[in-house]
Structures are given as structure tokens and as C-alpha cells.
Image (cartoon, helix red, strand yellow):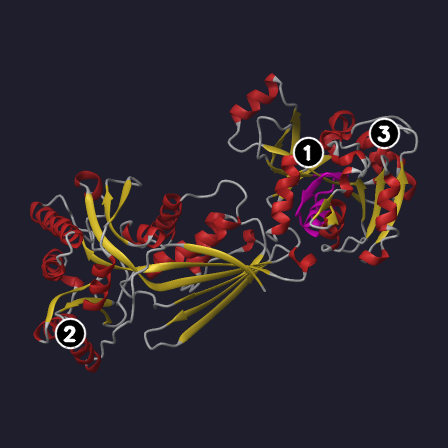
């Protein structure tokens, strides 16, 4: 930034909608968590290199000057422009400060908080070659807000609320925009404002200069402080460290975890077109192996991603990338961070942050780790949202969309829904997003018994991840096999609910045999040998989980033979994973560092 820009802040309003709070202090001086609102405004500009301020004060302006003084204790320079006799309106206040302004300058409404990148806005202003720039943001209450119509960066017209023009514009556009309340003007703006008169920027000046205006699109935080509800919202955001976290010394940290799942039956019936035509049934459970995400907010728009991916040998492979802003994210060939970046581009977070992701389970393990990765990162970004937050179903559907449409991983929706909802469930798939989650009610004793009898054993990484092999399910034989797989899943659920665990164990093996007939490439000689030896050592049932070709094997053991089977499988290179069931699903929490 070559020029040194001044910021003119309009802080002279009466704040009548906040009476009686504003009877003794001006609106910008109302305290939020021990600091006046205006201090947050000044800090938000300061972090982008703006250090010279002109405060246009009027009502109780002396209180502003008493608190901020010359600005030195805040690391800035502050001058004051007083409206002595009467309030002059937004344009009149700027005209009143003309003798303090040199060169192009920033103007910002004193009752609007934008977490806007002013350096980027200045660069935009200097590059487009027009004298006036307006920040433009997506409308969050379009029916009650005055709207700005833009084409590219050209501002076409303004639409006043409660007019036919406003109503027609709302019908014509998918995403309406509003004036963000921050501008960059050249000194030419003073030619359009008479001295000593009450004059409005929005009503009197902007219509005259519209052909010389360009709009800078701001997609970050914006809140117009109008009434007590807005103040409460701003206070909440400050407490949650969404606003200038460095002002508090302690860093806000958000964490998420999403569990992986083990499958008991029905895999393949959740894929289209079977799910829509016949209804799919899957039974699965989540376990206490997770994909963890940790997010630390930044005060700039930069995004830094770091991921530690565990491999089949128990070590970690670390990958890191950084981007100046969300729009600069790019995919690379064999990109190990592609899923995370795909989630970021889908969720479009407004803040900058450092994101760290790690998993307890290696990828391509047959336990749905990629779905859990999607769910974990979606969940933590959804937690940041102030509006349009996703429901649990929405999170699962978004994860499914990312895996199937962006990552091109064929599969059903079982993994995503299991990771979001957690627990032991029967899932009904009726085509598209028509999914029903049915918890399987079991006593605590039976759950403990099930954990004791089950082994989850790694047979090595899958050769490829292609989801359940999608066959021409209209073929009569394949249809019959899928119907059989679904029937076994229904029996699995029935026997779990009745707590008939031996029958459950035998059904696992029956389901595996039917899956091999449906998809012979799901297995290989090593996997078949492991399951056969487990059965010879006292296992009742066994199956490979996931898409096949490798990954984790589920074994149900006879009472008190688990340790022998576990030892035997380990000697053959198949190491068991210690686990217990997870009943939380996606969890998100926060702390301070």
C-alpha cells in the first residue's frame, strides 16, 4: 500500500433507537465487553495498516475525545471534526472534515462493523480507475434493507425499501446486495456536497455519482448496529472471539471430531439406483476412532491448512498449504489436501484461520475415514457460521456431495450419516437425501458384551477406493443378491435389538458370503485366509468392511476366545484396533489458549 490513507469515521449520530442507553453516551461509545464499540472499529482498520483517523463527532462528542484523545495509546493518530450547531447528515459530516483530508480517503459508518480487508479494497480502488468505491455485501435481511444492484463491479442503481422497484428487484435476483457502509473517495466527492448544509450520502450524493462508482464485494463479517438486538448479537460475537480475538490476549480455539464406522450389514443397498427403486437398508455403528479438526481464527483472510495423515505403519505424513484468501485455493494433481480444500470451497468461510486435521485411522481403511474427514471439517466451519447453519442431515448431505461430485468417489450415504449421527443404527435409504436414521435400542450390558466379542483387524490398505462396486442392478441375478444383502441387514438389526448376539455373529458371515457373490473383487486370497483362520480359532462370523480389496475386517468371536484369535491374526500381519462404541457422532467444542 503506497499511499497512506486516512479513515473518516461517522460517529456523530443521536442513536435514538438505543435510548435510554444513548442518553448519557453517544452510540459508538456504548461498551461491549468493557470496550466502546468505536474501539473495535478503529482496531479493525488498524490491522490493515490504517493509522490516521478523523472522527466526525456531534452528539456528546467530547466523550469520544476524552476516551480516545490523540490516539497515541491505541497506536494511531486521531483528529476530530465537530458538528457544532446541528447534525449535518452523513455527507454533511464528511464535507465538514474537508480541511483535514488529504488525497483519497476511507469513509465508514460509525454504527456498522465490517471485517473487511481494507488493503484489498484500496488495491481495488486504485486499479479500477474510478474516483469512488463502495463496499457491497450480501443482504442478510433483503426485504427490509435498501439494495444495491451491480453488474460485475459496476453499480447500476439503488433500490429503496418499501417500493415496487425494491420488490421487483428481489424477484429478479437470486442474491441481492446491500451497501456495506464503507467507501473510498477521492477529493472529488467534496464537489457534490454543499458546505454547512444537512446532506445525506445515500439519498443526495450517491444517485449523482453512480456512473463514477464501483462496487467492492465483501463476503466477510458485517453487522449494522441499529437496535438492542444488534447490540446483543455483536456482544455475543465478541465473547465468542469472532471479532478481533487479539484484543483479548487469549486465542479462541474450536475443535471437532467425527467418528469412523464399522458396518454390520446392508452395504451396497444404499447406492443408486437400488436405494430409490427398492429402498436400501444398512446397519452400522460408530467407534471411538476419530478425525479431529482444530481451528484458530486469524485477523486477516489468510487460510493455512495442515494435515497429519496416519499411514498403515502407524507413522504420520504431514502436508501443509497456505492461501491469502478462500478464492485463491487451487487443486493439484495427487493433492493430499484435496478433500479439505473441497470442503472449504463448498462452505465458503468468511474468516481467516489456521486449520489442523488429523485422523486416528489411515485413509482407504474400509471404515469411512474420508467421510469422517469431510464431516469433521464441515462441522467446524458450520459452527463458525452466523446464519444459514446446516442441520445434521445437511452436514451429511454436504459431505456426500463433496465425496461423490468433487472427489469422484462412488458410494452411498451410509458413511456420512453414520459419522454425523453416531451410535448403533439402522439406516433407511429411499433415494437421494430421503434417509431415516433409526437408533437400535440395546441395554448397556449387551453393548459391553458386543464390544467384548468383536475384533476390528487391519488387513492392509485397499488397492483402490471406488465405493461399493456399482453393478447393473437391473439384472435379475444381481437384484436378487442385493435383496438378500438387505434381508440380512434387517435380520442383523432384529437380532441386535433382541440382544441375540450369537445369531448376530453368524449373520455377519452370511452377509459376507453374499457380498462376495455380488462383488467377487471385494476379496482376495489373503483376506479369505484371515477370515477362515479366525473361524478355525473360534470366531462365529467375519467380514471385510468397506469397498473391498483390503481395509479392516470385523470378526465376532466366541466367548473368551478373542485374545487367541487376536494373537493369531497379528502373527499373520493383521493387527487389531482397540475400540469402544461412540454414541455422540459429530462433536464440536471450543476453548481458549
Query: Looking at the rendering, in which quadrant would you find the C terminus?
Result: bottom right
- Secondary element under disc 1, as helix, strand or loop, is loop
Q: Name the mark on residue 560.
A: 2
Eyeballing the image, is 96 above or below 267? above
Q: Is 189 displayed left or right of 439 in the figure?
A: right
Magenta stretch bounds: 109-134
Q: Nearer the viewer, mark 2 or mark 1?
A: 2
- Secondary element under disc 2, as helix, strand or loop, is loop
Q: Residues within 10 Å of mark 1 (few under 14, many from 20)?
A: some
Residue 51 on the magenta segment: no
- The x and y percentages for residue 105 are 80, 44
Q: Name the mark on residue 226.
A: 1
Q: Which residue is mark 3?
A: 88
Residue 111 on the magenta segment: yes
- The x and y percentages for residue 490 are 14, 48
* CA separation in Å, label 3 and label 2: 86 Å
Which residue shows up at 88% across the image and 39% down it? 97
Query: Looking at the rendering, in which quadrant would you find the N terminus?
Result: bottom right
Observer able to see residue 546:
no
Amino acid at each position: 500500500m503506497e499511499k497512506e490513507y486516512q479513515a473518516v469515521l461517522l460517529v456523530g449520530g443521536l442513536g435514538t433507537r438505543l435510548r435510554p442507553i444513548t442518553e448519557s453516551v453517544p452510540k459508538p461509545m456504548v461498551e461491549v465487553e468493557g470496550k466502546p464499540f468505536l474501539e473495535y472499529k478503529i482496531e479493525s482498520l488498524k490491522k490493515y495498516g490504517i493509522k490516521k483517523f478523523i472522527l466526525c463527532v456531534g452528539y456528546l462528542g467530547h466523550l469520544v475525545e476524552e476516551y480516545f484523545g490523540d490516539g497515541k495509546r491505541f497506536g494511531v493518530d486521531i483528529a476530530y471534526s465537530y458538528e457544532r450547531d446541528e447534525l449535518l447528515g452523513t455527507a454533511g459530516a464528511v464535507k465538514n472534515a474537508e480541511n483535514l483530508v488529504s488525497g483519497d480517503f476511507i469513509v465508514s459508518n460509525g454504527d456498522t462493523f465490517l471485517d473487511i480487508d481494507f488493503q484489498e479494497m484500496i488495491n481495488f480502488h486504485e486499479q479500477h480507475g474510478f474516483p469512488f468505491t463502495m463496499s457491497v455485501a450480501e443482504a442478510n435481511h433483503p426485504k427490509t434493507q435498501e439494495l444495491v444492484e451491480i453488474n460485475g463491479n459496476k453499480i447500476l442503481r439503488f433500490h429503496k425499501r418499501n417500493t415496487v422497484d425494491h420488490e421487483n428487484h428481489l424477484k429478479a435476483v437470486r442474491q441481492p446486495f446491500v451497501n456495506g457502509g464503507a467507501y473510498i473517495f477521492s477529493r472529488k466527492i467534496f464537489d457534490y456536497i454543499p458546505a454547512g448544509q444537512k446532506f445525506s450520502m445515500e439519498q443526495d450524493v450517491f444517485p449523482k455519482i453512480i456512473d463514477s462508482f464501483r462496487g467492492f464485494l465483501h463476503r466477510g463479517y458485517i453487522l449494522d448496529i441499529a437496535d438492542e438486538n444488534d447490540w446483543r448479537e455483536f456482544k455475543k460475537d465478541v465473547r465468542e472471539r469472532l471479532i478481533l480475538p487479539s484484543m483479548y490476549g487469549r486465542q479462541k480455539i474450536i475443535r471437532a471430531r467425527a467418528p469412523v464406522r464399522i458396518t454390520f450389514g446392508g452395504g451396497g443397498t444404499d447406492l443408486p439406483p437400488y436405494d430409490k427403486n427398492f429402498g436400501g437398508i444398512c446397519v452400522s455403528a460408530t467407534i471411538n476412532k476419530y478425525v479431529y479438526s482444530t481451528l484458530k481464527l486469524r485477523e486477516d483472510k489468510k487460510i493455512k491448512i495442515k494435515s497429519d495423515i496416519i499411514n498403515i505403519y502407524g507413522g504420520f505424513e504431514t502436508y501443509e498449504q497456505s492461501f491469502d484468501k478462500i478464492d485463491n485455493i487451487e487443486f493439484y494433481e495427487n493433492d493430499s489436501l484435496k478433500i479439505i480444500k473441497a470442503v472449504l470451497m463448498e462452505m465458503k468461510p468468511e474468516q481467516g484461520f489456521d486449520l489442523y486435521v488429523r485422523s486416528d485411522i489411515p485413509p482407504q481403511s474400509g471404515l469411512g475415514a474420508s467421510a469422517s474427514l469431510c464431516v469433521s471439517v464441515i462441522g467446524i466451519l458450520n459452527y463458525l457460521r452466523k446464519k444459514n447453519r446446516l442441520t445434521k442431515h445437511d452436514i451429511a448431505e454436504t459431505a456426500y456431495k463433496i465425496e461423490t461430485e468433487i472427489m469422484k468417489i462412488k458410494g452411498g450415504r451410509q458413511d456420512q450419516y453414520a459419522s454425523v449421527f453416531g451410535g448403533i443404527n439402522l439406516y433407511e435409504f429411499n433415494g437421494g437425501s430421503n434417509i431415516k436414521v433409526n437408533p437400535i435400542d440395546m441395554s448397556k450390558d449387551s453393548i459391553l458384551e458386543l464390544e467384548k466379542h468383536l475384533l476390528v483387524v487391519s488387513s492392509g490398505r485397499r488397492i483402490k477406493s471406488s465405493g461399493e462396486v456399482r453393478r447393473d442392478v437391473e439384472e435379475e441375478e444381481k437384484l436378487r443378491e442385493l435383496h438378500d444383502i438387505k434381508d440380512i441387514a434387517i435380520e442383523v438389526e432384529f437380532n441386535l435389538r433382541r440382544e441375540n448376539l450369537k445369531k448376530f455373529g453368524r449373520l455377519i458371515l452370511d452377509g459376507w458370503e453374499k457380498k462376495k457373490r455380488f462383488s467377487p473383487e471385494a476379496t482376495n486370497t489373503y483376506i479369505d485366509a484371515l477370515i477362515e483362520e479366525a473361524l478355525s480359532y473360534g470366531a462365529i462370523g467375519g467380514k471385510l468392511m468397506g469397498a473391498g480389496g483390503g481395509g479392516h475386517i470385523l470378526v465376532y468371536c466366541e466367548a473368551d476366545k478373542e485374545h487367541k484369535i487376536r494373537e493369531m491374526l497379528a502373527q499373520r500381519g493383521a493387527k487389531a484396533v482397540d475400540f469402544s462404541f461412540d454414541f455422540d457422532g459429530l462433536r464440536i467444542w471450543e476453548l481458549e489458549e
